[in-house]
Image (cartoon, rainbow, N blue to C red):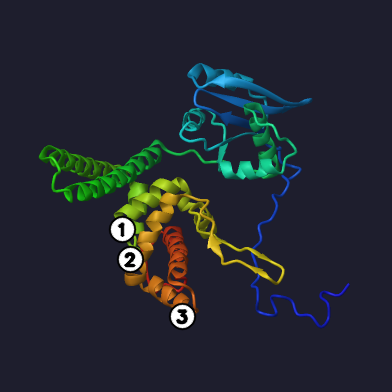
Amino acid sequence: MPDRIEGRKSLYEQGRHRPLDLPSLPKPEEETMAPTTWIGIDIAKQDFVAAQRSQTGFETQCFPMTEEGFQAFQQWLPQASKLGIVFEATGPYWLPVARWLDGLEPTIPYACINPRRLRDFAKASPQRSKTDAIDAALLVHFAETFPPALKPLKSLRVQTLRALWRHHLELQNLLDRARDRQEKALADPQLPPQLATRLQSLLDGLKTELVQVEREAHDLVQQDAAMSHTYRLLLSIPGIGPKTALTLMAEYGPQLLHANPKQLTRYAGLEPILFESGSSVRRRPRISKQGNWRLRRALYMAALAGVRWNPILKTFYQRKLQHGLAKKSALVAAMRKLLHLVYGVLLHQQPFNPNHQGA
């Protein structure tokens, strides 16, 4: 069979498409390696349901979200040479399970997946009922079909930094809303004086708490030599300030030093999504927004500064505009480029150098 039909150029030869890096299906584990025995956990507020494969299908059991429940769950686990646990990011209720798994000796590796991935996977299943036991078994099936990356053990310092900095973000949002409320209230000439005083007291309290949390986060980073070095390297990149650096360290965690640019981009929800079919369907590319919105928010502000003061980002941004890209799309591309700069600086463990050939 000929490679292509004569007289008809491929879409790539016509210039309508560039080669795509299509995602590949998960490869089966090597025969010489022990297969992973997956345990699915469907988590609720007060208990969780675990599922494992058995000779007749699935064996499920419910455990309370207590220390006694965790101990019973540990006794229920099968004796396997390679064990993996998978569960969804169900609000904050998965955190006790993850914290208990991190504290085990020896530890049991686990994967916390995006609920949207499981929901889309469930739509392709012939099972239409939905119960906790069915969801736990579905998690096992999902992990066997698309093996997720098992999370490395996070240090207590990294977990504390993430909690502190997310609290900082919530305080900043509260402060912004309080300022807006005060501005609108003061526009009323009949506003009672005592209410104006209380609004100002609320603002002062939020500002004090915000400064205190920010100081604690900085002190936490400075107390660890490795985190302090990473923090200084991030600050060497024009456009990245203290708040953006802390956001990157808190949200990416240990993966900031090990992930490649594509993984960093995907986790932030900045990967481009194409929607094309045939010769007539050509939707405008967009970003996935399926990643961490806190990272996108921080990177957006960093890119705004970077396209002005970072020589590499500035040149990159101007080139995108000259190619006809809209300003917002060019700024999103600059956000992805910024992650490439972060990757390069942390990979070589050297401060940012605009004259580096790889930049």
Residue 92 versus residue 275 in the image, above or below: above
- Which quarter of the rendered picture does the C terminus lie within? bottom left
Quarter residue 190 falls in: top left
Residue 241: assigned label: 1
Outermost residue to the front: 190
Does 32 sit left or right of 50 as displayed?
A: right
Q: Secondary structure at mark 1?
A: loop
Q: Amino acid under label 3?
A: Gln
Q: Residues within 10 Å of mark 2 (few under 14, many from 20)?
A: some
Q: Amino acid under label 1?
A: Gly
Disc 3 and disc 1 in contact, CB within 8 angstroms: no
Alpha carbons under labels 3 and 1: distance apart: 28 Å
Q: Secondary structure at mark 3?
A: helix
Residue under label 2:
305
- Which quarter of the rendered picture does the N terminus lie within? bottom right
Q: Secondary structure at mark 2?
A: helix
Q: Amino acid under label 2?
A: Ala
Alpha carbons under labels 1 and 2: distance apart: 10 Å
Residue 292 appears in the picture as rendered: yes
Residue under label 3:
322
